[in-house]
Amino acid sequence: MIAKLIRSIWAGIFIGIGATALMGIQIPIVGSLFFALGLLTIIHLKLNLYTGAIGFLKDSFSFKDMGVIYLGNLIGTFLYGSCLKLSNLGIAPAAILLKKGELIANIPDFFFHILFASFMCGVLMYTAVVVWKETSNVFSNALITVLCVSVFILSGFEHCIANMVYLFAGSCDAPAMDQLLFIALVTLGNSLGSILFHRSRKIAS
């Protein structure tokens, strides 16, 4: 479990690195492509990312595994986001936080928006991972992974681990409980999207 926790912490850090590229590049489509470095690295180094693992719950991962992975991702994003906030890299997540802050401040009004955006992100993250598990063409696998990440960002879909980075790296005025509720709702949507797509594929196969 210690090894899994360490791999999960580093997965959170690499999502932070991808998020930093997105925040630092002013052209959205370019930033979204560089964000994909995080997931590509996680897949190649066999790190543990919650959104890449939750779809395989009970098949490859237990509830205990998922708890360890989520905790590790949380620790990784906290360490990275806090250091980014204290650094002088010139990365300003203000625009992203402005959007997140609006959602967090009006969760009842944006409930379905958040859940749907999170659900679709879960579908895309499952797709990005499962192609590596089921096919051997490295080029097509990398292309699909990069496109899944780019599309989820450009579409405004919500990723629970990336959102942790934004909230830790920035300064959100919303109460802590509202931020926790937002992350919990995004986590639920990511989980449902990934799990339901995986289960429906098994039924249809």
Image (cartoon, helix red, strand yellow):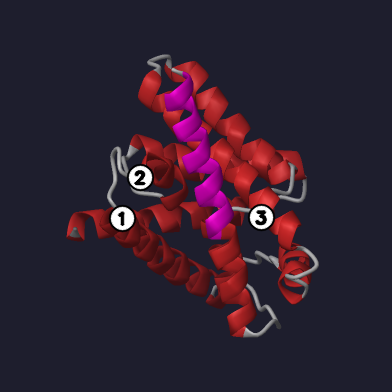
Q: Distance between the residues labelled 1 and 2?
A: 7 Å
For disc 3, the marked residue is 115
Instruction: Left or right? Give the position of 91 relative to 103.
Output: left
- The amino acid beneath tag 2 is Leu
For disc 2, the marked residue is 57
Label 2 sits on a secondary structure element that is: loop
**Residue in the picture at 79% in, 70% down:** 102
Is tag 1's residue or tag 3's residue first in the polypeptide sequence? 1
The span picked out in magenta is 187-204
Is tag 1's residue or tag 2's residue first in the polypeptide sequence? 2
Numbered tag placed on residue 25 in the rendering: none
Q: Distance between the residues labelled 3 and 2?
A: 20 Å
Q: Nearer the viewer, residue 54 or 76?
A: 54
Q: In which quarter of the image is the C terminus?
A: top left
Instruction: Left or right? Give the position of 170 relative to 99.
Output: left
Q: Is residue 53 above or below residue 197?
A: below
Q: How crowded is mark 3: few (under 14 residues within 10 Å), some or many (20 or more)?
A: many
For disc 1, the marked residue is 63
- The amino acid beneath tag 1 is Phe
Is residue 202 located in the magenta-colored stretch of the structure?
yes
Residue 150 rendering spot, x and y as whole percentages: 65, 38
Mark 1 and 2 residues: CB-CB less than 8 Å, in contact? yes
- The amino acid beneath tag 3 is Leu
